């Protein structure tokens, strides 16, 4: 199935041009003949979203979208009536393809859930800006990383198994606002489950769908910019270790920040040096942890940034705690908050 | 140091391929270690050398004492060898009445001052030129100077006499080559060459894992070793010693002994941390480790500091005594990036931690807390209640959104950092409010 | 201590190792055939790269015509005010007559034989030597190193004890790297019990990371590269 020129699909309230839909999708119909309903043709479909930003999507095999179409038509959509009559068929296909199959599962992580819910909200904002539907599997808790890192593998396995059950009951990409938790799900949970064939297969399935937020936005969706950005701010980006070294995360968030409205990104000296959090290391070896934190904070100061930005709230909690104790004017934000323009939300809403 | 190291690698286009190759060579050798050790030993003997097998440090020291005894040895010069520190060889030989002189400048200084080295490659990183100047003025009777070049010259002159008159030279072994019975010694100062050329007896102490199959394999490892450790393309002196002097050779030792040491390595090889034996002791992981940078070498308590020590020490000597070391890391992974043979140190720190936990070395409060958390995390309703409770308790303890004094073990956090207040409305509650599910 | 039963020890030792290797938890690797790995290291001009890299590690490198070798050597002797030298025998030098020429010019060669039965006496005599002169069996362009193999009439001390080491290296013997050397001269480790790869003068950074030249080995290394560009 060839993509026939630009095809615009997506939520209408984003103001995209519906007139583009008809000719393209009618071309798809023509290929199959008017007798055949494109929905009957199994296979992979590719389409792109022209506005607000290019979005490349891929749909896997479709069995029967009709019940979904009925639900979609029941929702209220604003569109150009003239074109609607011509495009209804293609439009519905487009809507179904984009909305039903591409919902993103948000695994918000226990730290974000409990301490930084505004980061979760910013994440949802960004994903929706990118044209995604976000779902939140309600029974999610913790991936098991704290137990795993300390050596309590039985406990880690329990938490991991629960996480796998919750996520495996869903479809579509799983997106996390955390490099270290993504690393846990992608690399360590499969290792933990290696001895149990059923769990191991489940772990592989889930790992294959799991992506960190900047990775998803930039590498998967091909976005250069997302979200409204913020008022004039100088920011320095700290690439947290697990994401940096185990998932090659750095340029994605940096590029999103570089293209964001109002954001001036300055280089953080020795950015790759660990901040000293290290999970329970922060309370088990507090002197070393704090010494490493002070080294990192000196570099933050040297950068001249007003905001320290990162992709892991664990590091940010540690560095932010130090900055606040030191009475520094530098604030700390997850990159999702900067990109979504959520700078002034208090911790408690 | 690290900027120079990056530069030296940037002009070597084969660096990444060579690291892969060096890693494969080392892992292949470990998987077939007995075969290569057997081949090595046969070749050494064919070249006129002698091979001794030492199960542990005590046995190794006894062997070397016996060699010294059988050969009327009174004075010994040593070039730098971590494995001889591991087995405390110097103390053993001194107890037998021998005079031992360390010849690596840093080790010489350490020996003179009765101290211990703090870094694999730079043993006296912790001493200033003033410390050293005073030491030399006191012990070498050569007047006071604090100029590094002058101090080096003093050491050179003093140690030259020792080299040229010593009965025995003891060296370590950076790499052994199995198919030619060769011991490779890598130094910058030249003390490796002098130690193994001037005295009539040369003894090499070798960790049994320090071996590769052929000259070509050794070359691959050597080409990444110096670059990773010190930023040099090759160290100044790479010596390949394959036996005592042959008939007709103008100089060189009359006897060549290799002491192959186990000392816990076979147990490590048979276990989960086998990969650590691929280490070639280049020191790159130390240079990059942020924890090591803060605490220095002495804090690690044993011969091998830094990331490598955090795995090697508990592996060789047991977790019972050394269970804290694997926790002296944030698992940042900088060491793997720096390691010329890409050893996955964080992976092994995690397997060691898992065994430490199983062996009961974790504090009771931690095991309890994690256990409770795991139970909550497998019962979503409990979990949500836990978060809600956290929000309530947090708001009681917090002021303007921050907690500056947490009770019990939390005080380890709030000693120097503030703790943000747990959200009164966690994310799941906000989502539910907005979406109804 | 059981140091008198080597065969038993060896068998037990290796048995333990074999047992361990069989249960070793090692990461998987592809089939490795032992031997040199050359990769795609392409150096356009070996001589130029060698000169550049050897200079980098603080060798004094000069590319000269073979006929100038004696004059250059004499001039180095004069530079350091040396009357005596320790050298490889003339027969081991890459060009004939260096030793004879030095003697003819009034310089005194030291005996390079160190008999086992009189080791201390002969070695102590080397204490104050200023210049040592050797040939070289190879050059490594990538690292700016010279390769010396030792054997009859080839003193190790000559490149080790003196303040200054002068090495005569035929340009045709320069190869790309140590791996290339190992691939092309595998027998070099069996034909000689002592081979050394020298990459510059002796050095240390042990005192406050301050780089000092001339610790135990030579303080100055002069490489005279013989042959055409």
Image (cartoon, helix red, strand yellow):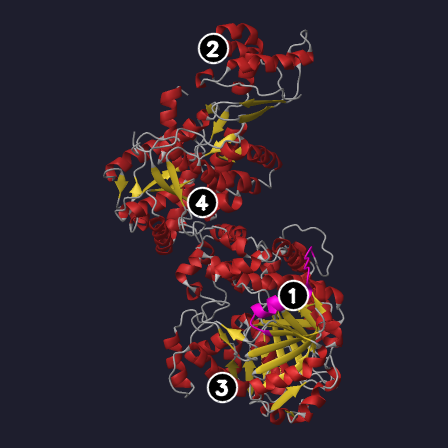
Where in the figure is residue A159, as x and y percent of width and height?
Answer: 48, 37
Image location (x, y in percent) of residue C108: 64, 93
Using the numbered discs, state the Cα–Cα distance from disc 3 to disc 1 in whole angstroms.
39 Å
Binning the other alpha carbons within 10 Å of mark 4 as few (below 14), some (14 to 19) or many (20 upward) gives many
- Mark nearest the camera among 3 and 1 is 1
Q: Badge 2 is on which residue?
A: A79
How many marks on residues? 4
Q: Is residue A61 above or below residue B143?
A: above
Marks 4 and 1 close (CB-CB < 8 Å): no
- Who's the residue at 73% across and 61% down the image? C35
- Given the image, what chain letter belongs to the residue carrying mark 2? A
Q: Is residue C207 left or right of residue B250?
A: left
Q: Position of residue B84 (x, y in %)?
A: 55, 73
* First to last magenta residue range: C39-60
On residue A239, the disc is 4
| Chain where mark 4 sits | A
Which is closer to the viewer, label 4 or label 1?
A: 1
B36 relative to A73 in the view: left or right = right
- The quarter of the rendered structure image containing the N terminus of chain C is bottom right
Q: CA distance from mark 2 to mark 3?
A: 93 Å
Spatial CA distance of label 3 from label 4 is 50 Å
> Which residue lies under the disc numbered 1?
C48
């Amino acid at each position: 199935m060839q993509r026939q020129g630009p095809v615009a699909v997506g939520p209408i309230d984003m103001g995209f041009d519906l007139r583009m839909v008809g000719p393209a999708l009618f071309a798809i119909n023509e290929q199959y003949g008017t007798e055949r309903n494109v929905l009957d043709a199994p296979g992979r479909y590719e389409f792109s979203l022209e506005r607000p930003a290019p979005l490349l999507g891929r749909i896997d095999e479709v069995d029967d979208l009709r019940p979904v179409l009925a639900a979609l038509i029941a929702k209220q959509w604003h569109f150009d009536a003239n074109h609607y009559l011509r495009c209804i068929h293609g439009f519905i296909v487009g809507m179904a393809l984009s909305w039903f199959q591409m919902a993103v599962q948000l695994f918000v992580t226990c730290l974000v859930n409990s301490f930084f819910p505004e980061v979760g909200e910013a994440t949802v904002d960004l994903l929706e800006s990118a044209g995604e539907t976000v779902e939140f599997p309600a029974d999610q808790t913790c991936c098991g990383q704290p137990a795993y890192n300390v050596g309590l593998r039985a406990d880690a396995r329990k938490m991991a198994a629960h996480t796998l059950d919750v996520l495996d009951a869903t479809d579509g990409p799983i997106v996390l606002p955390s490099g270290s938790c993504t690393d846990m799900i992608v690399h360590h949970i499969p290792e933990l489950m290696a001895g149990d064939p059923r769990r191991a297969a489940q772990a592989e399935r889930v790992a294959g769908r799991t992506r960190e937020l900047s990775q998803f936005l930039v590498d998967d969706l091909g976005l250069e910019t997302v979200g409204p950005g913020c008022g004039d701010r100088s920011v320095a980006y700290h690439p947290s270790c697990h994401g940096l070294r185990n998932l090659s995360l750095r340029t994605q968030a940096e590029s999103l920040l570089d293209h964001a409205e109002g954001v001036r990104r300055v280089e953080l000296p020795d950015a790759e040096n660990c901040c000293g959090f290290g999970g329970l290391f922060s309370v088990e070896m507090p002197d070393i942890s704090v010494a490493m934190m002070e080294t990192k904070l000196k570099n933050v100061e040297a950068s001249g940034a007003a905001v320290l930005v990162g992709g892991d709230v664990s590091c940010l909690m540690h560095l932010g705690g130090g900055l606040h104790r030191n009475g520094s004017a530098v604030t700390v934000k997850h990159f999702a908050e900067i990109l979504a323009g959520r700078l002034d939300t208090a911790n408690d809403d | 140091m690290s900027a120079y190291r990056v530069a030296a690698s940037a002009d070597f286009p084969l660096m990444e391929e060579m690291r892969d190759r060096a890693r494969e060579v080392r892992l292949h050798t470990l998987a077939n270690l007995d075969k290569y050790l057997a081949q090595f030993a046969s070749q050494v003997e064919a070249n006129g050398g002698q091979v001794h097998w030492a199960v542990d440090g005590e046995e190794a020291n006894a062997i070397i004492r016996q060699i010294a005894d059988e050969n009327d040895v009174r004075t010994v010069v040593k070039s730098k060898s971590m494995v001889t520190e591991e087995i405390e060889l110097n103390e053993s030989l001194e107890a037998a009445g021998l005079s031992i002189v360390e010849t690596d400048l840093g080790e010489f200084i350490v020996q003179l001052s009765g101290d211990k080295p703090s870094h694999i490659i730079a043993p006296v990183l912790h001493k200033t030129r003033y410390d050293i100047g005073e030491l030399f003025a006191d012990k070498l009777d050569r007047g006071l100077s604090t100029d590094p070049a002058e101090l080096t010259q003093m050491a050179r002159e003093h140690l030259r006499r020792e080299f040229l008159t010593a009965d025995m030279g003891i060296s370590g072994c950076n790499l052994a080559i199995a198919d030619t019975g060769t011991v490779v010694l890598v130094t910058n100062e030249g003390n490796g060459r002098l130690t193994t050329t001037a005295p009539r007896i040369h003894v090499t102490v070798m960790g049994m894992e320090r071996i590769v199959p052929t000259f070509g394999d050794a070359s691959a490892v050597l080409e990444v070793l110096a670059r990773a450790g010190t930023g040099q393309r090759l160290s100044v002196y790479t010596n390949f010693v394959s036996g005592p002097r042959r008939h007709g050779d103008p100089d060189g030792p009359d006897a060549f002994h290799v002491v192959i040491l186990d000392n816990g390595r076979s147990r490590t090889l048979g276990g989960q941390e086998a990969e650590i034996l691929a280490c070639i002791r280049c020191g790159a992981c130390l240079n990059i480790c942020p924890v090591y940078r803060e605490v220095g070498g002495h804090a690690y308590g044993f011969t091998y500091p830094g990331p490598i020590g955090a795995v090697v020490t508990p592996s060789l000597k047991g977790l019972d005594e050394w269970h804290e070391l694997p926790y002296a890391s944030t698992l940042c992974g900088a060491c793997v990036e720096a390691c010329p043979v890409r050893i996955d140190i964080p992976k092994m720190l995690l397997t060691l931690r898992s065994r430490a936990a199983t062996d009961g070395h974790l504090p009771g409060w931690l095991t309890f807390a994690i256990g409770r958390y795991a139970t909550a995390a497998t019962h979503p309703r409990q979990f949500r209640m836990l978060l809600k409770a956290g929000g309530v308790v947090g708001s009681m303890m917090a002021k303007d959104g921050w907690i500056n004094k947490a009770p019990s073990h939390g005080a380890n956090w709030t000693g120097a950092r503030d703790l943000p207040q747990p959200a009164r409305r966690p994310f799941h509650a906000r989502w539910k409010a907005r979406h109804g599910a | 201590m059981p140091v008198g039963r080597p065969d038993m020890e060896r068998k037990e030792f290796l048995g333990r190792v074999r047992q361990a290797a069989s249960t070793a938890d090692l990461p998987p690797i592809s089939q490795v055939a032992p031997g040199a790995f050359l990769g795609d290291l392409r150096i356009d001009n070996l001589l130029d790269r060698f000169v550049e890299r050897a200079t980098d590690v603080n060798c004094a490198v000069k590319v000269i015509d073979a006929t100038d070798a004696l004059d250059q050597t004499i001039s180095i002797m004069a530079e350091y005010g040396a009357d005596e030298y320790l050298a490889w025998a003339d027969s081991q030098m890459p060009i004939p007559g260096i030793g004879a020429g030095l003697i003819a010019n009034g310089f005194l060669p030291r005996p390079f034989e160190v008999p086992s039965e009189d080791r201390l006496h002969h070695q102590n005599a080397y204490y104050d030597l200023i210049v040592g002169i050797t040939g070289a069996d190879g050059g490594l362009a990538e690292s700016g190193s010279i390769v010396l193999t030792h054997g009859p009439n080839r003193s190790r001390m000559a490149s080790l004890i003196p303040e200054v080491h002068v090495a005569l290296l035929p340009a045709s013997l320069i190869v790309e790297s140590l791996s290339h050397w190992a691939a092309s001269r595998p027998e070099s480790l069996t034909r000689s019990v002592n081979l050394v790869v020298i990459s510059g003068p002796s050095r240390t950074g042990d005192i406050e990371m301050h780089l000092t030249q001339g610790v135990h080995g030579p303080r100055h290394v002069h490489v005279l590269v013989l042959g055409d560009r």
